[in-house]
Image (spheres, rainbow, N blue to C red):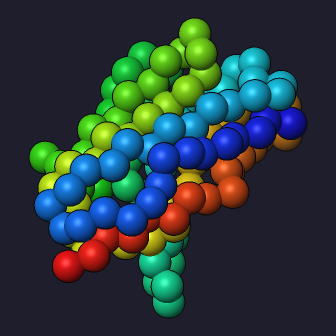
Amino acid sequence: QVQLVESGGGLVQAGGSLRLSCAASGDIFGINTMGWYRQAPGKQRELVASIGRGGSTNYADFVKGRFTISRDNAKNTVSLQMNSLKPEDTAVYYCYTNRYRPTGWADYWGQGTQVTVSS
């Protein structure tokens, strides 16, 4: 089993910055993509950004130019630098990773960290 623990959420004013971090532990051999999703009240969980083991990145249009994702394969961590935050970025942010198993792809999620952006 893979455990993901997030840190770095909090309250910030619009235009400010936050950095989220996530550490993977446990049976982490073979973890593949790492990334961040978010879920605002009354909305579906949505992809924010992801990064492959080789460093290829994918961003949602609504964060391009403002957020930067990075990972450290040696430490099994992924981070999300969030700049120019907007009130609409308010959500619970979840760390994510996946791994291929004999039975297919397995997804793993962190417990979530709250990000609140005040106007």
User: In this rendering, would 28 be left or right of 40?
Assistant: right
Q: Quadrant of residue 48?
A: bottom left
The quarter in which the N terminus is drawn is top right
Q: Quadrant of residue 73?
A: top right
**Residue displayed at 29% across by 55% down:** 60
Q: Position of residue 72 (x, y in %)?
A: 49, 18
Q: Nearer the viewer, residue 35 or 19?
A: 19
95 versus 39 height, above or below: above
The quarter in which the C terminus is drawn is bottom left
**Residue displayed at 15% across by 61% down:** 15
20 versus 32 height, above or below: below
So how many labels did they put on this image?
Answer: 0
**Residue displayed at 61% across by 22% down:** 76
Residue 61 visible in the current orientation? no
Q: Position of residue 110 (x, y in %)?
A: 67, 50
Q: Nearer the viewer, residue 23 or 104?
A: 23
User: In this rendering, would 105 be left or right of 89?
Assistant: right
45 versus 107 height, above or below: below
Q: Nearer the viewer, residue 34 or 94?
A: 94
**Residue displayed at 31% across by 63% down:** 12
Q: Nearer the viewer, residue 10 or 94?
A: 10
